[in-house]
Amino acid sequence: MKIVMTMTDAATMSPINSINSINGAVVTDSFEVEVRVLGPVEIWGLERPIKRSWATELIVYLAMHRRAVSNEVWATALWPDKLMAASGLHSLTSVARRSLGRGENGMDHLPRARGHLRLADSVGTDWMNFKNLADNGLWEQALQLVRGRPFESLRYSDWPVMEGWVALMESEITSVALYTAEKSLAKGDFETAQWAARKALSASPYDERLYCLLMRAADLAGYSWGVEAVMKELVKVMELDSRLGDDQSRHRADNRRGLANRCIEQQVLNFLHPQTVELYLKLSKYHNCTRSV
């Protein structure tokens, strides 16, 4: 029996690798245990539920560091402002080892070692599968693995940011999405283009290039109101309205019905990248009503 453990300690049964072959060719690594970090953290394939949340944090950290990590290093990453007793580290390691269990070869997924830890090769990540799929040109399949912000719901999330993991994942996910969407637009497949952009936005919600792509897709599909909807979504996500003063925000009181509701204040546009604004003004059917505040 294999278990999936999320950060809310919910357990269920599921296969480990949902995308393990395409057109008869194996394109992803098939792991006995998979640590999923491309969204809310989950661990699939556990032998038993994890009783301590810090054991989940440890497994995630080790999954992202494939070489042996000294106890001092991983303890500092998880508790940077606290000196942990050796007995506490040993206890936590034991919990993680019991939950991971043993592989098909009878060996522990978290082998015993003195002074350091390293997960067995039987444990992998969805990030590894994402890279494998993308490297093989299977960009849509790679994007299917994206479920949200990288390392979302991790109890202590500083180390993925400080070590550059979050920025790297957001960058590569966005690059794959942009490439997929551009190819789709060239073929007139607006739906796939929008899907790819939305997948990337779930991981990197502040990237203006993705909103530009959505505006282009809406325009090419003949959905002019969609251009305005995307721009309003960007304004809301970036919280640009909150940057306007009271004298400026009073102008929005008139934008309650009809055509006026689609107007974007010029002062708001000033906070966006010039290329984003240029594209919006080019595509918008209502840019003549853009307000000067």
Image (spheres, rainbow, N blue to C red):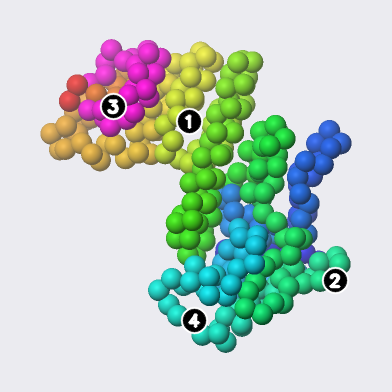
Label 3 and label 4: CA atoms lie apart by: 50 Å
**How dense is the environment of label 3, judged by Cα within 10 Å: few (below 14), some, or many (20 and up)?**
many
The magenta segment is 267-291
Q: Which dot marks residue 269?
A: 3
Specify the amino acid type for callout 4. Met
> Which quarter of the rendered picture does the C terminus lie within?
top left
Give the residue at x 31% y 15%: 287
**How dense is the environment of label 4, judged by Cα within 10 Å: few (below 14), some, or many (20 and up)?**
some
* Tag 2 residue: 106
Comparing labels 2 and 1, the label whose residue is closer to the camera: 2
How many numbered discs sit on the rendered protein?
4
Comparing labels 4 and 1, the label whose residue is closer to the camera: 4
Mark 1 lies on a secondary structure that is helix
Specify the amino acid type for callout 3. Leu
Q: Which dot marks residue 84?
A: 4
Label 4 and label 1: CA atoms lie apart by: 43 Å
Residue 116: x, y in percent? 63, 74
Closer-to-camera residue (53/74) = 74
Q: Are marks 4 and 1 in contact (CB under 8 Å)?
A: no
Lower sequence index among marks 1 and 3:
1
On screen, residue 116 above or below 229 = below
* Tag 1 residue: 210
Q: Quadrant of residue 200?
A: top right
Specify the amino acid type for callout 2. Gly
Comparing labels 3 and 2, the label whose residue is closer to the camera: 2
Lower sequence index among marks 4 and 1:
4
Q: Are marks 2 and 4 in contact (CB under 8 Å)?
A: no
On screen, residue 286 above or below 154 = above
